[in-house]
Image (cartoon, rainbow, N blue to C red):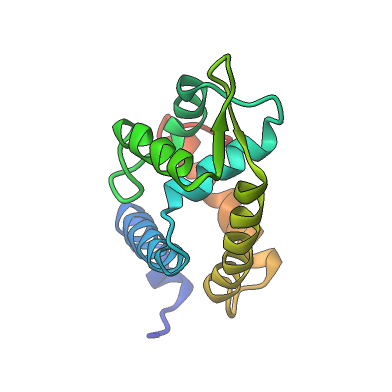
Amino acid sequence: MMDHTDAELAQHPVGYWTGAAHEAVIRYINAEHAKAGVTQRHWMTLNALLRNEGGLTREEVTDQLSRYMTPQIGDVSTYPAVLDDLLGRGWVAAGPDGRLTLTGEGHAGRARVAGRTEGIRAVLHEGVTDEEYAAAVRVLRRITANAGGPETL
């Protein structure tokens, strides 16, 4: 990696670097998740269901995850297919009220993917201290807010 002075880096276009980072990170995450037979949308859905023990309707899953959708991650309209896939695998079950919950197989599948996720994070954070990462996130949140975007997840 070519080193630049702080003065040179201060002139780099933030739009380019945020876009390049997003595309590279999502491409890497998707490739790693594919090795486990899932997509990032599967992972996000499994986590949403894990956080909501009482289950979620299809609409609630879509509402909760829609803010994370980008062209690289996928469009909100893809969630029915993701949910159908998880139902078909037996990782998710629909109750009589239509609420979706993780099954035992879903918890086990999520645990397998979680093991990969730890490795993904380790690769992406290689050479970056927790302090540097936190500072980068703080700066990106501030820039996002300055541009009129959300300040929090």
Q: Residue at x 57, y 22 (%)?
A: 99
- Count of labels in the image: 0
* Residue with the most extreme bottom position: 2
Q: Nearer the viewer, residue 104 or 83?
A: 104
Q: Nearer the viewer, residue 86 or 73?
A: 86
Residue 14 is situated, as x and y percent measured from the top left of the image, at 36, 55
Q: Residue at x 39, y 59 (%)?
A: 26
Residue 118 is situated, as x and y percent measured from the top left of the image, at 63, 67
Looking at the image, residue 149 lies above or below residue 30: above
- The answer to which quarter of the image holds residue 35 is bottom left
Q: Residue at x 57, y 14 (%)?
A: 97
Q: Residue at x 41, y 54 (%)?
A: 39
Looking at the image, residue 48 lies above or below residue 118: above
| Residue 11 visible (yes or no) | no
Which quadrant of the rendered structure holds the C terminus?
top right
Q: Does residue 74 appear left or right of residue 46 in this picture?
A: left
Q: Does residue 27 appear left or right of residue 150 in this picture?
A: left
Q: Does residue 21 appear left or right of residue 116 in this picture?
A: left
| Residue 113 visible (yes or no) | yes
Q: Does residue 122 appear left or right of residue 61 in this picture?
A: right
Which quadrant of the rendered structure holds the N terminus?
bottom left
Residue 137 is situated, as x and y percent measured from the top left of the image, at 58, 53
Residue 88 is situated, as x and y percent measured from the top left of the image, at 43, 42
Q: Nearer the viewer, residue 56 or 17?
A: 56
